[in-house]
Image (cartoon, rainbow, N blue to C red):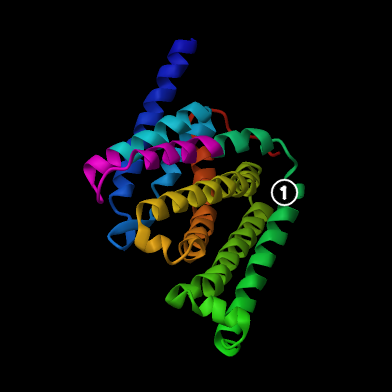
C-alpha cells in the first residue's frame, strides 16, 4: 500500500513538474548586465504544491527538477548549479513551514495577516510621499539612488497591500455566503501566505547574494538596489500563488474523495 501511495505521489509530482516547466517558459524575465535578476512566473505554484500535499521531500524534488528542465527547455545564460539548490529549497521550505502552522487557529493568523499588510501599505504610502514631495530629504535622496526602482518601495508596496486586502475581502464575502467547503480555501490561504511568503523572502535573499556574487557590475551598486524590487515581486506573487495553491489543494482533496470539513 505504501509503495502504491508513493507511486501516486511521484506521478502527481511529475505532472506538477511538467506544468511548472511549461509555465516557466512563459515567464517575464528581467535582466541586468546580461544576468537574469528577476523571473515573474506562475511556475512556483506547481513545484510548491507537491511538498504541501505529500511532504517536503516531494517539494524539493519538484523544485530541483523544474530548474534543471526549465534551463534545458529555455536556457537563459549559463547554467549555475547553485540556483538549482536554491530552487530545491524553494520547494522544500514552504512544506516544512506549512507542517508547523497548518493546525494553528485561523483567527490568530488573520490578525497577523492584517497587521502585516497594513504596515506594508503604510510604508508604501510614506515612501511615495517622500519620493514625490521630499526628494531633497535624506531619506528622499536615499530612495532616489535607486532610480526607477524606487517605485518598488512606493507603489510596489502599496500594490502588495491592495492585493492582500482585496483577496481578504473577497475571501470573507465568499466564505460568509458559501458552504462549508470553501472554508478550506479560506483558512488555508492565510497559512499559505505565511508558508510561501517566508520561504520566498529567504530564497529571494539568498539568490540576491548569489546574483551579486556572479555579477560584479551589479554588486558595485549595492545589495539593497537589487534586493528590494525582488522582495516586492516576491510578496505580490506570494499572495497570488497562495490563493491558487489553496484552490488546487482543495480540488485535489475533492478529487481524492476527501472533501474537507469546516475548520
Residue 56: x %, y % from top left? 52, 30
In the displayed structure image, the side of residue 45 where residue 187 appears, left or right: right
- By secondary structure, the bulk of the magenta-drawn segment is best described as helix
In the displayed structure image, the side of residue 226 where residue 153 appears, left or right: right
In the figure, 24 relative to 219: above or below?
A: above
Residue 88 part of the magenta segment: yes
Residue for point 40% across, 33% down: 62
In the figure, 133 relative to 42: above or below?
A: below
Residue for point 66% across, 43% down: 180
Report the span colored magenta. 69-93
Disc 1, SS:
helix
Rendering quarter of residue 119 = bottom right
Residue 253 in view, yes or no: no
Q: How crowded is mark 1: few (under 14 residues within 10 Å), some or many (20 or more)?
A: some
Foreground pick, 36 / 124 = 36
Residue for point 72% across, 61% down: 115
Judging by the rendered image, the residue that carries numbered circle 1 is: 109
Residue 55: x %, y % from top left? 53, 28
Residue for point 59% across, 59% down: 167
Amino acid at each position: 500500500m505504501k509503495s502504491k501511495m508513493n507511486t501516486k505521489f511521484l506521478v502527481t509530482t511529475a505532472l506538477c513538474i511538467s506544468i511548472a516547466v511549461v509555465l516557466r517558459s512563459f515567464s517575464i524575465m528581467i535582466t541586468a548586465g546580461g544576468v537574469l535578476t528577476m523571473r515573474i512566473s506562475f511556475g512556483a505554484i506547481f513545484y510548491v504544491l507537491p511538498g504541501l500535499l505529500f511532504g517536503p521531500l516531494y517539494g524539493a524534488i519538484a523544485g530541483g527538477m523544474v530548474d534543471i528542465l526549465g534551463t534545458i527547455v529555455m536556457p537563459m545564460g549559463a547554467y549555475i548549479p547553485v540556483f538549482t539548490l536554491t530552487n530545491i529549497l524553494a520547494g522544500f521550505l514552504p512544506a516544512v513551514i506549512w507542517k508547523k502552522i497548518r493546525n494553528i487557529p485561523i483567527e490568530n493568523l488573520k490578525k497577523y495577516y492584517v497587521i502585516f499588510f497594513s504596515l506594508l501599505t503604510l510604508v508604501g504610502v510614506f515612501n511615495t510621499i517622500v519620493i514625490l514631495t521630499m526628494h531633497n530629504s535624506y531619506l528622499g535622496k536615499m530612495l532616489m539612488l535607486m532610480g526607477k526602482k524606487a517605485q518598488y518601495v512606493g507603489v510596489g508596496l502599496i500594490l502588495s497591500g491592495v492585493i492582500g486586502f482585496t483577496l481578504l475581502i473577497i475571501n470573507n464575502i465568499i466564505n460568509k455566503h458559501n458552504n462549508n467547503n470553501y472554508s478550506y480555501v479560506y483558512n488555508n490561504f492565510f497559512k499559505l501566505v505565511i508558508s510561501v511568503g517566508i520561504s520566498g523572502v529567504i530564497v529571494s535573499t539568498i539568490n540576491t547574494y548569489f546574483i551579486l556574487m556572479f555579477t560584479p557590475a551589479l554588486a558595485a551598486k549595492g545589495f539593497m538596489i537589487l534586493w528590494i524590487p525582488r522582495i516586492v515581486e516576491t510578496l505580490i506573487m506570494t499572495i497570488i500563488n497562495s490563493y491558487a495553491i489553496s484552490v488546487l489543494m482543495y480540488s485535489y482533496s475533492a478529487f481524492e474523495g476527501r472533501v474537507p470539513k469546516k475548520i
